[in-house]
Image (cartoon, rainbow, N blue to C red):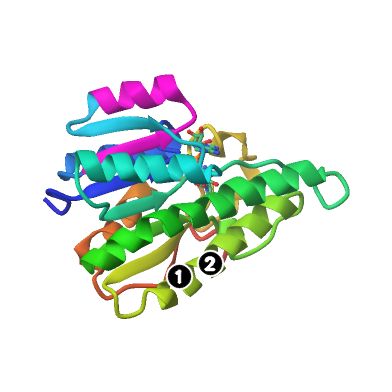
Amino acid sequence: MRFDGRIAIVTGGARGMGASHARALAAEGARVVICDLLDDEGEALAQELPAARYRHLDVTDEQSWSSVVRETEDAFGAVDVLINNAGIVHFGGVEALSPAHFRQMIEVNLVGAFIGMHTVLPGMRGRGRGSIVNISSAAGLTGFAGGVGYVASKWGVRGMTKAAALDMAGTGVRVNSVHPGVIRTPMGDSASPELFARQPIPRIGEPEEVTRMVLFLASDDASYTTGGEFLIDGGQTI
Ligand code: NAD
């Protein structure tokens, strides 16, 4: 199994795509730390999985990140895999979107992923191994009306990933971004079917279809891949 003995942290892991990534990592042998704000869902999922635990984590909170990483290292060992998946969306164009909602998306989607990398990278560098997968979006490669804050945050994740991959040059640590289109989750369900009806693959995507790419990048199968951006969008952005 690709993740036998490996330690993985998945943020936003209590539901949606994060839960799918956590399930698949556990099924392939990883010890998974599921982090989220949704304690009931997170605890329930952790109990279902072998060698998983749940930790409450607001990704915007630097001190909570330090505690989660320290506790993980004490309980399991150093972190091998970080999936920065937690995210939120508020729709609204430039005039309609409140600055507070714009800031909140930057804070959770972009700053949250930065703090996660900032906290785990020293351990990964020290061991000369690690893989970070940052979940951006098809909206991190294009724009859409009414998505000004979300698009800004997801382009940020994409750019930050490339800079981090360069910062980690020669260390054995890889950093890549994944760009899903419309996926069937509590967040994706709010999207209009018109969004995917015109795609070459004219249907909504399933969380497991994204998970397969995320696990590829997290694993040694992607040993020659860093700083890359990986679309799974049914052709939406062609
Ligand atoms: P979701 O809303 O089902 O799950 C997101 C999870 O993140 C939730 O469990 C939520 O509680 C958690 N979360 C939110 N804020 C948090 C915080 N501050 N700290 C910790 N956890 C927090 O959404 P999803 O569709 O599974 O989205 C997962 C990721 O994929 C997100 O980054 C999202 O932007 C991205 N994405 C989703 C789609 C889609 O169509 N569903 C498309 C492209 C990208």
Q: On the image, numbered disc 2 is attached to which residue? A: 160
Task: Kindly indicate the quadrant of the structure image that contains residue 220.
Answer: bottom left
Helix, strand, or loop for circle 2?
helix
Magenta span of residues: 31-47
Helix, strand, or loop for circle 1?
helix
How many numbered discs? 2
- Confirm if mark 1 falls within 8 A of ligand 1: no
The residue under the point 68% across, 44% down is 104
- Residue 109's spot in the image, x, y percent? 57, 49
Q: Which is more toward the observer, 215 or 168?
A: 168
Q: Which mark is residue 10?
A: none
- Residue 37's spot in the image, x, y percent? 49, 30
Q: Which is more toward the observer, 119 or 90?
A: 119
Amino acid beneath label 2: Met
Q: Which is more toward the observer, 205 or 229?
A: 229
Which residue occupies the extreme bottom position in the image? 170
Q: Which mark is residue 164?
A: 1
